[in-house]
Amino acid sequence: MQGAYEDAVTALFASLDRVEALLKASTGPYLLGEKLTEADVRLYPTIIRFDPVGNEKLIMKSYPAIHKWLRHLYWEVPAFKETTNFEHIKKINPTGVTPLGPLPHILPLEG
């Protein structure tokens, strides 16, 4: 069981490293440049849930390009903020434990 967890976590952070590199190389605020694409829409739910449920690394501290992208979507594209409920994200935890942090759930756009 521990080995499977470690393999999955290693793969997860390798994927986040690839997304971070993509965003650093992007010519615009989105994954693929100036236009919002399905790739952004599909990645958003994974990333917005990442910090509130607690992990070894936090997006807001370890992945600056992903964090900037996330804040842009949340604060500048109304549909993302309107459909994000942090309390719901925290309570969908199969262990029944609701994480306390991080607070704030997402930093301001310029933060």
Image: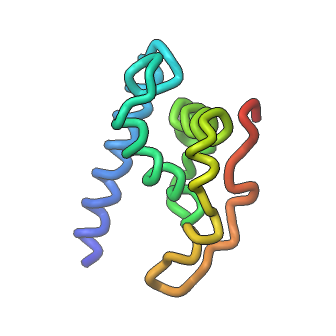
Q: Which residue sits furthest bottom? A: 96
Q: Is residue 9 left or right of residue 110?
A: left
Position of residue 57 measured from the top left corner of the image (x, y, whole percent): 53, 52
Q: Is residue 15 above or below residue 64?
A: below
* Quadrant of the rendering where the C terminus is positioned: top right
| Residue found 55% across the figure and 67% down from its top | 89
At x 38% / y 48%, what residue is drawn? 13
Which residue is located at x 57 percent, y 37 percent? 73
**Image-based side of 90 in relation to 106, left or right:** left
Q: Say which of 6 and 36 sits in front.
A: 36
Residue 61 shows in this picture = no
| Residue 7: x %, y % from top left | 25, 60
Q: Is residue 76 above or below residue 91?
A: above
- Point out residue 85 in the picture as x, y percentages from the top left corner: 62, 62
Q: Residue 76, how many percent across, how many down? A: 65, 33
Q: Quadrant of the N terminus?
A: bottom left
